[in-house]
Image (tube, rainbow, N blue to C red):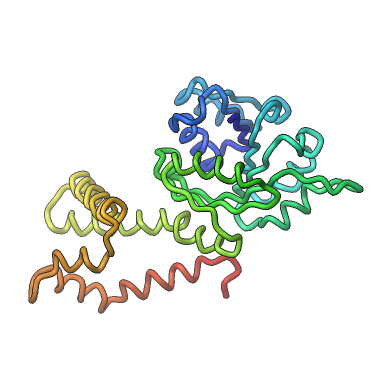
Amino acid sequence: MKFAIIGAGNIGSALAFGLAQSGLVRPEDICISNTHPEKLGRIKEREPLIRTTTDNRICTDGADVVVLAVKPWKLSPLVEQLKDLLDYKTQIVASMVGGVGLADLQSLFRKPGDDTLPPIYYLIPNTAIATRQSMTFLSSVGATQEQDEQLLAIFKSLGDAMLVEERLMNAGLVLASCGIAYALRYIRANTQGGVLLGFTPADAQRIVAQTMKGAASLLSVDGSHPESEIDRVTTPAGLTIRGLNAMERNGFTTSIIEGLMASIPHAK
C-alpha cells in the first residue's frame, strides 16, 4: 500500500517514520509533501528512502492512501486543490486534522453536482507513532470492511489501534494524544523527585522511564488490572501505601480526571 502524507509537521513526519519502520509499507512507497524544503530535508536525513516533494500533485499520484496532516485552518484550501488530483474510486483519504469530523470532511470533498466521495477516515494517532508505540484511533465513512481491516492492521503495526465510533474520537484524542503530554509531565515530576532523593537528573529520568515501561508491560502483556498490581507492592503500613495516600490527599486522581475533562474539545 502506497501512502501520500500532505504536511511534514510533527505528526506528519512521525507517521512517515513509523510507516517506514513498520515492515508493512516500504519506505520508497511513502511520499511526504510540504511547502518548506528544510522540513523535508530533515526527513531525508533520517529516512533517505522516503520520497519528499513540495508538489502535492507528485505526492498524491499513484497513492492508495492520502493522509492530511495539516493545521485546521489549512485544510479547506488544501482540499480544494486535492479535489482535482484524487481519484475518488481508487484512493482513500485519511485526515489527522483534529476536531474535523467525518461529516465535515465529506462536505469539503463533495464536488458540485457530483455525489461521489472517496472512502474517508478520521485518524487520531499520537507522536509515539514515530517509534511505533502510538495508540491510534480510526473512524471511517464510505469504506469497505476490507479497507477498514487493512488500515487497522497497518496502524496496529505502529503500536496499537482501534476502529471506533466517531463519537469516541474526541475521548481518544484526550486519552492518547493529549495523554502523551500528561504521561510525560508525570515522568518529569517523578524525575524531579528522584533528584531530590539523590539521583542525578539523567539517572532519575532513566529510572522513571524504565519503571513506566515496566508498569505498562504488566497491563499490556499480562492483561492485569492496575489495582491488582498496586496490591502486589502495597504492604500493610508500608512505604507504598503511605506514598499513595499522600498523593491522593494532594488530589492526584482528581487532578488527572479534571485535566482529561478540561481537554475535551469545546468543553466548558
Q: Is residue 153 above or below residue 222?
A: above
State the image quarter where residue 51 is shown: top right
Picture coordinates of residue 184, whole percent (x, y): 35, 54
Asked whether 180 or 192 is in front, the reply is: 180
Quarter that holds the C terminus: bottom right
Q: Judge whether 117 appears above or below 89 on screen.
A: below
Please state the total of marks drawn on the protein image: 0
Residue most extreme to the bottom? 249
Q: Is residue 17 left or right of residue 202?
A: right
Q: Nearer the viewer, residue 57 or 117?
A: 117
Residue at (47% x, 54% y) in the render: 177
Quarter holding the N terminus is: top right
Query: Furthest residue to the right?
Result: 113
The residue positioned 24% from the left and 72% from the top of the image is: 247
The percent position of residue 169, horizontal first and vertical second, equals 56, 59
Q: Quadrant of residue 185?
A: bottom left
Q: Nearer the viewer, residue 61 or 246?
A: 61
Could one spot residue 188 in this view of the protein?
no
Q: On the rendered structure, is 134 left or right of 206?
A: right
Q: Residue furthest front?
A: 145
- Residue at coordinates 60% horizontally, 69% vertically from top-left? 266
Residue 24 spot, x, y in % from top left? 48, 31
Q: Quadrant of residue 242?
A: bottom left
**Does the rendering let one see residue 126?**
yes
Instruction: Report the front residue among 71 and 91.
Output: 91
Residue drawn at x 50%, y 70% is 262
The x and y percentages for residue 75 are 70, 47
